[in-house]
Image (cartoon, coloured by chain):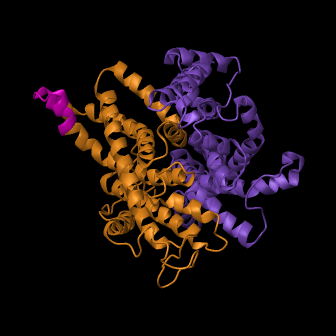
Chain colours: A orange, B purple
Amino acid sequence: MSVDVTAPIDTTVRVRRPRRWSPSLIAGIVLVGLVAAVGLLSLVWTPYALDDTSSGARLGGPSASNWAGTDRLGRDLFSQIMVGAGNALVVAAASMLVAGVLGVLIGVLAGATRQWVDITLLSAVDLLIAFPTLLLAMLIVTVRGASLSSAIWAIGIAGSAVIARVTRVNVARVLREDYITAAQAAGTGWWGTITRHVIPNVAPTLLVQLMLLGGSAVLAEASLSYLGLGAPPPNASWGRLLHEAQSTMTVQPWGAILPGLAIVVTVLGLNLLGDGIRERTDPSLRGDR
Amino acid sequence: MKGVLFRVGALLISLVLASVVVFVVLRLLPGDAAGASLGVGTTTDQLESLRSELGTDQPVPVQYAQWVGDLVRGDLGDSFTSRQPVADLVAAKLPITVPLSLAAFVLAVLISVPLGVIAAVQRRGPVGVVVSAVSQLGVAVPVFWVGVLLVLVFALTLGWLPSGGFPRQGWDDPAAAIRSLALPVVTVAVAMSAVMVRYVRSATLDVLDQDYLRTARSLGYSRWQALRRHGLRNAAVPVVSILGIELATSLLGAVVIENVFALPGLGTLLLTSVTGRDLPVVQTLVLALTAVVLLMNALVDMLQRVIDPRLRRTGVTA
């Protein structure tokens, strides 16, 4: 047999050098970059103002003047989809921030302090993982009302559980390494160990998890907006656009198709970006997973 | 046996914690149930009397004790808005939500297990590549959008199935009921399959790389024979743990999808209660759905021990 290495995780032998720029990474960067560019552009320019009801005929199909057609009030759909890109990215970035800060804090505390802290925090995290994001969001919306920030908090808090889990496992793993013992012997304190040795080691894994979280945040926000629990009307959210277009899609199907495609492109981009970063940073990863 | 007792104990503790979370989130964040349910322009007297009627003038721990006490005795409380018992409201919705999520789950398993195994065995062949690509795309698709597209194609364009609603006679008209649930079931199942195919494929790939499968091949078994005799049971262990989570997902998927198809089920009830700030209904429904999720996780843990004897020796599953 030509296979002679039986490492516990990786049983295939790859002689060729790992690709620094995998197709996933490139595709992810292109897709997320495209959405980000459209979102940024929408801040300074859209073909029509969002509330401009005279941009074209009501429920018109795609044309030279309205690239995605118009909605039932005669507003330009392409402009709304452009603004929706900004909205989706704000939700993704803000939930990633909430989940990242909360999750890393909980994970480091659980992995690098006393055992009772670890057990207490882990039980809380496990409960949060079992608690469905959608239900948490509904609880928060019941109390705070439907808004962009309610959605962000719900998605961020739910996501922090996964980040905390990943952080904790990796913190515990890094802390067992010989170089940590060496650093501590050399006089590095708890804080120094965490910031100089643990965080840099955990960062690539966390970045991957955060990208995947960003993808699920875009999906969750779209679901909430579709249900009418997201950002209220002046904000253009893809989920709400789909909801509004559903009742008129016999006349104008594009309104029910294009915002959905925008969601898929964004989520696919973030997922591919996560996969690409993992392939780039994790040397033990097989190419075909 | 000890493992089972341990798991049941852990389940009970999680349930209690979940009830605390639901209760605290609904009470301690700014906002007042009585104020919200009466709306603008009510007098302080009206507010006070409603608060004492609802019990929200009591200290929070007392309210919690009352709620849990009532729950244990089977009293789920009354809705703020319709004044009907929550138990009756929920019971009326179960004949829609339960068949929807169970059928979607079964269909998703029937789609994803064979596809995932084939994708793993032929990982470099055309089938494997296509299945992987489609599922990568599928996990990026919002479940409600799948529903919208299916309505557009099969209801509005082809006219094969109704675009939404549920027959007034309910299950007394089985053919109409099944026709109403067909598109919702397919929607939830398709969305779930995209996720499950990836797990099945990855679990099967792990098994395919194992030494015992190589040994079986060296004894003259074909790739498929070796996998069937030695591989599938091993691959089933991680897949079963996902199935439990996915059964819960199908329930939550149903909650969203009912709103796409205007089905009067639990999801529609939950959404109207959330927008109407109907606290008793929201807290009972959220807790009940969470309890189902936790119960699934516990059952799956125990089922894994049945499939994999290695897990029985240790007290806690990994």
Residue A286 picture quarter: bottom left
Q: Which residues are magenta?
A: A181-196
Question: Looking at the magenta stretch, what is its main secondary structure?
Answer: helix
Residue B9 picture quarter: top right
User: Can residue A228 be seen by looking at this rendering?
Assistant: yes
**A187 in relation to B263, above or below:** above
Residue A275 at x, y = what percent? Answer: 40, 56
Residue B163 at x, y = what percent? Answer: 73, 61
Residue in the foreground of this view, choosing between A231 and B12 = A231
Residue in the foreground of this view, choosing between A284 and A271 = A271
**B279 in relation to A267, above or below:** above
Residue B175 picture quarter: bottom right
**B160 in relation to A153, above or below:** below
- Residue at x-position 59% and y-position 32%: B279
- Residue at x-position 49% and y-position 27%: B27
Q: Residue furthest bottom?
A: A64
Residue in the foreground of this view, choosing between B251 and B124 = B251
Q: Residue furthest left?
A: A186
- Residue at x-position 48% and y-position 79%: A67
Residue in the foreground of this view, choosing between B132 and B205 = B132
Q: Is residue B127 magenta?
A: no
